Image: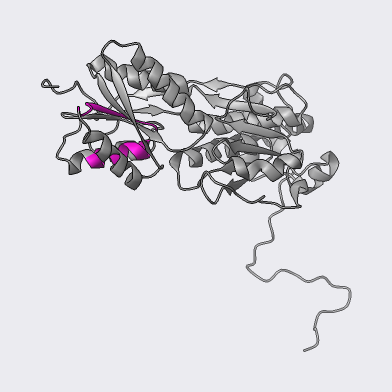
């Protein structure tokens, strides 16, 4: 059907139709926050430190959120020669710890108008293909867990800036590292059990050849060696509840039976608790159990799990800040973040007859 619109007239919106809302601009954000456009550019461009007060920076970010302002990243990328995108490589998406690492990295990235692409190594801790193949130019840098080393081989060859999480700072070629004080965490857990009077300990060790689990084993051995009459026996296990069930069963049926099981991970601790129940042992009356990570699983168990809390979100946030420093040509910090033992109901003094 031919159009009935008269020549020279514009199409009018239908009655009752809402006109499209104009996209807010940086000028709108400046007016809303009562600051200059230059200040908005500094804050939303991540260059405000030392030039704008933290209070003003937060006011600008709050105004941008309230208005729904989104910078034109494509135009900015053309100006900067960057994509403002980081790749985060983790062993698995189903693990609470790495989900929180992603949350922390994404929070800091958003504050600096960066995007984060999440890439899980499909075999957990095993080999993984290069997630972007020849499209490395689509990334500005990489943040990666040391538990997915093979996934990084091709990316290293591409020369992308790399920040490593939970890795040996002396042995890695990364531009920066972010670590947790894993050794202190294991010392806290072992010291707690030794302080309760336990002398026969079983170590449910993750059967994964990485720096972080090596640190745990060494710290446990050193701590136990400093206490007269104390000994530790190690059973290795894959990182699953089912594998830990079998490993803990072996440990708890050995003679003399351990009075405490100290685990490299909360999943392993869940398997240890399950093994104890199947053997007719009570936790903590007959055997104490400790974990590592403080996953949501720790408070789902009954009794709730004594474990070492790792600040996963801060690990991700610190990793993103380190990458931003590297990209800006600044010296990146290499923080070692404190960890904390959380005492709950799965530990107690050993049974009197032991």
Q: Residue furthest right?
A: 8
Q: Residue furthest left?
A: 353
- Tally the marks: 0
- Position in image of residue 83 (x %, y %): 76, 44
User: Quadrant where the C terminus lies?
Assistant: top left
Is residue 339 visible in the rendered image? The answer is no
Q: Viewer-proximal residue, 298 or 187?
A: 187
Q: Colour mode?
A: one colour
- Residue at x 29% of width, y 44% of height: 246
Image quarter for residue 352?
top left
* Residue 129 highlighted magenta (yes or no): no
Is 27 left, or right, of 143 in this rendering?
right
Is 265 left, or right, of 61 in this rendering?
left
- Position in image of residue 68 (x %, y %): 64, 46
* Residue 270 highlighted magenta (yes or no): yes
Is residue 253 visible in the rendered image? The answer is yes
Report the magenta residues as a range. Answer: 256-275
Q: Viewer-proximal residue, 326 or 121?
A: 121
- Position in image of residue 324 (x %, y %): 70, 31
- Residue at x 36% of width, y 40% of height: 267
Image quarter for residue 21?
bottom right
Q: With respect to residue 48, does 80 lie above or below? A: below
């Amino acid at each position: 059907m031919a159009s009935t619109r008269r020549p020279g007239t514009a199409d009018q919106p239908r009655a009752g139709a809402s006109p499209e809302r104009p996209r807010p601009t940086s000028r709108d954000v400046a007016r809303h926050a009562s600051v200059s456009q230059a200040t908005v550019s500094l804050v939303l461009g991540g260059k405000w430190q030392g030039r704008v007060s933290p209070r003003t920076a937060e006011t600008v970010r709050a105004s941008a959120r309230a208005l729904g302002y989104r910078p034109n990243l494509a135009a900015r990328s053309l100006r900067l020669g960057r994509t403002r995108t980081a790749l985060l490589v983790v062993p698995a998406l189903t693990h609470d710890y790495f989900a929180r690492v992603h949350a922390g990295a994404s929070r800091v990235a958003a504050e600096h108008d960066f995007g984060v692409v999440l890439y899980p190594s499909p075999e957990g801790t095993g080999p993984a293909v290069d997630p972007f193949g020849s499209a490395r130019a689509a990334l500005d840098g990489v943040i990666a867990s040391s538990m997915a080393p093979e996934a990084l081989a091709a990316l290293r060859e591409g020369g992308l800036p790399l920040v490593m999480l939970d890795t040996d700072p002396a042995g890695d070629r990364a531009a920066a590292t972010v670590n947790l004080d894993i050794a202190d965490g294991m010392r806290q857990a072992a010291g707690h059990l030794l302080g309760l009077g336990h002398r026969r300990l079983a170590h449910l060790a993750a059967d994964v050849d990485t720096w972080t689990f090596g640190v745990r084993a060494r710290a446990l051995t050193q701590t136990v060696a400093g206490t007269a009459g104390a000994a530790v026996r190690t059973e290795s296990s894959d990182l699953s509840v089912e594998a830990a069930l079998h490993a803990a069963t072996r440990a708890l049926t050995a003679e003399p039976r351990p009075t405490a099981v100290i685990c490299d991970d909360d999943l392993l601790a869940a398997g240890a608790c399950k093994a104890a129940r199947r053997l007719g042992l009570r936790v903590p009356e007959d055997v104490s159990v400790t974990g590592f990570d403080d996953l949501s699983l720790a408070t789902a168990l009954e009794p709730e799990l004594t474990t070492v809390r790792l600040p996963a979100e801060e690990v991700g946030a610190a990793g993103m800040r380190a990458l931003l420093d590297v990209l800006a040509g600044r010296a990146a910090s290499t923080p070692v973040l404190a960890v904390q033992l959380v005492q709950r109901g799965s530990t107690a003094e050993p049974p009197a007859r032991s």
